[in-house]
Amino acid sequence: MHIYHDRLAIITPGGLPAGMKKEDLGHKSVPRNPLLFSMFYRMSLVEQIGSGIKRISDLCREDGVAEPDFEVSEYWFTVAFKRVVAPIQPENTEQVTPQVEKLISALKGDMRRDELFAAVGLKHRMHFISEALLEEKDVAPEKREDWKEVG
């Protein structure tokens, strides 16, 4: 799973099963491993063969979000859910702390946590949560402990 600023991508090794094409998604199903599917079906861990893609698309439409993009290659299968990136509203910008400004200015596209920490000069996750994101004076003492417990 890869989380980007504009999408969430779920990537699975292996292309589609033999006999499947991208156009077949949501209409036809060919289990990659019929024995495994049969076992999951008997355990009630799957509802119906070939219903997942259609259910995902239906749920996205019901929630008013874009349907996912499916990318198929010989070696990978990717489902990407688009994320609506809301613009910063002027009325909210006064609340941005200097720490958050530093964090935002350090962002360069998609970055891993260790890359971001290095860019803003941090080494420890707990320090990042308690010092870089929170101004201690703005957070009640009992809430500071809640934040620090987030693993």
Image (spheres, helix red, strand yellow):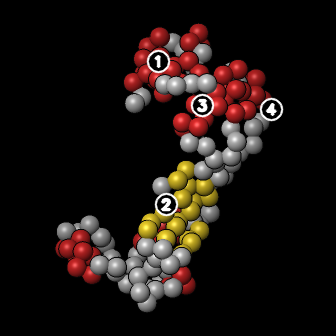
One can see residue 40 in this view: yes
Q: Residue type at mark 4: give it.
A: Pro
Q: Is residue 45 left or right of residue 69?
A: left
Which-is-in-front pick, marks 3 and 2? 3
Q: Work out how far the residue at label 4 is from the one at label 1, CA to CA, in angstroms.
A: 27 Å
Q: Work out how far the residue at label 3 is from the one at label 1, CA to CA, in angstroms.
A: 27 Å
Which-is-in-front pick, marks 1 and 2? 2
Give the residue drawn at x 54%, y 81%.
22
Numbered mark located on residue 143 in the image: 1
Which residue position holds label 2? 10
Farthest-out residue, bottom: 19
* Residues marked 4 and 3 touching at CB (< 8 Å): no
Q: Work out how far the residue at label 1 is from the one at label 2, CA to CA, in angstroms.
A: 34 Å
Which residue position holds label 3? 118
Q: Residue type at mark 2: give it.
A: Ile
Which residue position holds label 4? 90
